[in-house]
Amino acid sequence: MMLSVEERLREKKAAVEDYMAKALAGQESLLFAAMRYAVLSEGKRFRPLLVLASGESFGVSQEVLLPFACAIEFIHNYSLIHDDLPSMDNDDFRRGQPSCHRAFGENIALLAGDGLLTLAFEIMLQAPTPEAFSRRKLEAIAEVSRQAGPEGMIAGQFLDITLPVEELTEEQMIALMQKKTGALITASVKVGAIMGGASAEEMKAVEEFGRKLGLAFQVRDDILDAAEEGSSRSSVMKPNFVHWAGKERAYQLIRELVGEAVEAMKRIGRLTEEIHFLSFKLLDVAKP
Ligand code: IPE
Ligand code: IPE
Ligand code: MG
Ligand code: MG
């Protein structure tokens, strides 16, 4: 029986969750309990699904891709634990439950984040990748390091806490979103393409896809945050695209970005049903 794209993505999400649960199993310490608490909660798993969808569009098996999908989701989850800390966004809730530091204390949450970040690299390095892929594997790990590091996601988090909210320029607003969120999403799609041996031209298109989708993702997140204001969220005043440019521009920008992102994949003949579905899902907040 043919599965629908939604059913296929549901199965992939379950495979990612199973892989992550196994990677965190078998350790009874409070540290691992905190890591499991943060990771194995209700996330969308957008980045690991992108790793699988991108890699599969280049003919790579799920088995080869899963360690990378899991590692990137671990890095994402570490970034969320640290992002919620009192010295950062001071958020008490994450994914419908108390944030990691609210449940385990700040000191343990900090270490749970550190643990996930380092474990991610161990998982990628120890991935049972076929011999012929070993060069690609190193390239993929280098890509993840760069995008997650102080010129990528961390640079974005730094801008997020240091730029003056009142006088943000367009350039700053875009750079901030591209780095804090776009970078890891770009890494997700590029890792799939790297493992699939994409050509330079293909890689350029995949990168464009990732950058545009990643930016759209953060604009969507800002729309959701702006809509939630006044509720229980305790986020301090932070740069938000909706405050900066208004809701209408936010909707318009997401629509443009998703359209252009998908076009880039179409251009190289890699626009699969999964990639199309995951991309257009971001428009669920954009008014027609
Ligand atoms: C939230 O990420 C934080 C951002 C980087 C925008 P997600 O919206 O992917 O959160 P989960 O993983 O689904 O909970
Ligand atoms: C978080 O951005 C980005 C990273 C964790 C790298 P936000 O602060 O906008 O994400 P939420 O709103 O807390 O999920
Ligand atoms: Mg936050
Ligand atoms: Mg947000």
Image: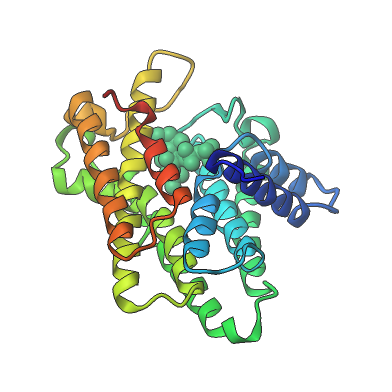
Residue 196 lies, with reference to residue 132, above or below; the image says: above
Which one is nearer the viewer's eye here, 125 or 135? 135
**Is the C terminus in the top left, top right, bottom left or bottom right quadrant?**
top left
Q: Is any atom of residue 88 visible in this view?
A: no
Residue at image point 35% right, 56% down: 210
Residue 73 lies, with reference to residue 237, above or below; the image says: below
- The colour scheme used here is rainbow
Question: How far from the left and from the top, in percent, is residue 172?
Answer: 19, 47
Residue at image point 62% right, 45% down: 2
Residue 11 lies, with reference to residue 238, above or below; the image says: below
Drawn side of residue 222 relative to residue 54, left or right: left
The image quadrant that residue 258 belongs to is top left
Looking at the rendered structure, the number of numbered marks drawn on it comes to: 0
Question: How far from the left and from the top, in percent, is residue 36?
Answer: 72, 44
Question: How far from the left and from the top, in percent, is residue 136?
Answer: 51, 79
Residue at image point 49% right, 53% down: 50
Which one is nearer the viewer's eye here, 180 or 100? 180
Q: Is any atom of residue 249 visible in this view?
A: yes
Which one is nearer the viewer's eye here, 208 or 109? 208
Drawn side of residue 247 relative to residue 53, left or right: left
**Is the N terminus in the top left, top right, bottom left or bottom right quadrant?**
top right
